[in-house]
Image (tube, helix red, strand yellow):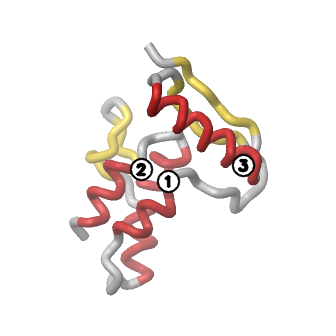
Amino acid sequence: MNRRLLIVGAGGFAREVAWLVDDINRANPTWELVGFLDRQPGAPIRGLPAVSLALPADLHPLAVWTFLREPTTDLAVGDQATSPLDWLRSGGSPDPVAAIAREL
């Protein structure tokens, strides 16, 4: 069973810690990165760059906004539908979000 990790802060050092966790997990799965705890609005959301690259280039910005904010059962936590942004903020893997984004 992986140990849960919540990184306090979301600045450059926090991203480096997340990269280190990814490196450790590639060698020996140890950590489940739950997410970042940061009080600063606009803090980076882990996985969002990967999701943005999966979006169709011609997708209208309003469609992108709707996609990111609208809860979907494809990203359910228990029986609760979750939006892609909330999924990523909670530490969810960007992989299923990117898969949905590619289908838009």
Residue located beneath label 3 in the image: 10
Q: Which mark is residue 47?
A: 1
Marks counted in the figure total 3
Mark 3 is surrounded, within 10 Å at the Cα level, by few (under 14), some (14 to 19) or many (20 or more) other residues, namely: many
Residue 56 in the figure: left or right of residue 52: left
- Local SS, label 3: loop
Q: Quadrant of the N terminus?
A: top left
Q: Nearer the viewer, residue 94 or 19?
A: 19
Specify the amino acid type for callout 3.
Ala
x, y percentage for residue 40? 77, 54
- The residue that disc 2 covers is 94
Labels 1 and 2: the sequence-earlier one: 1
Q: Are marks 1 and 2 in contact (CB under 8 Å)?
A: yes
What residue is rendered at 69% in x and 35% in y? 7
Measuring from the top left, give residue 75's x and y in whole percent.
Answer: 33, 45
Q: Position of residue 74 (x, y in %)?
A: 27, 47
Mark 2 and mark 3: Cα distance apart in space: 17 Å
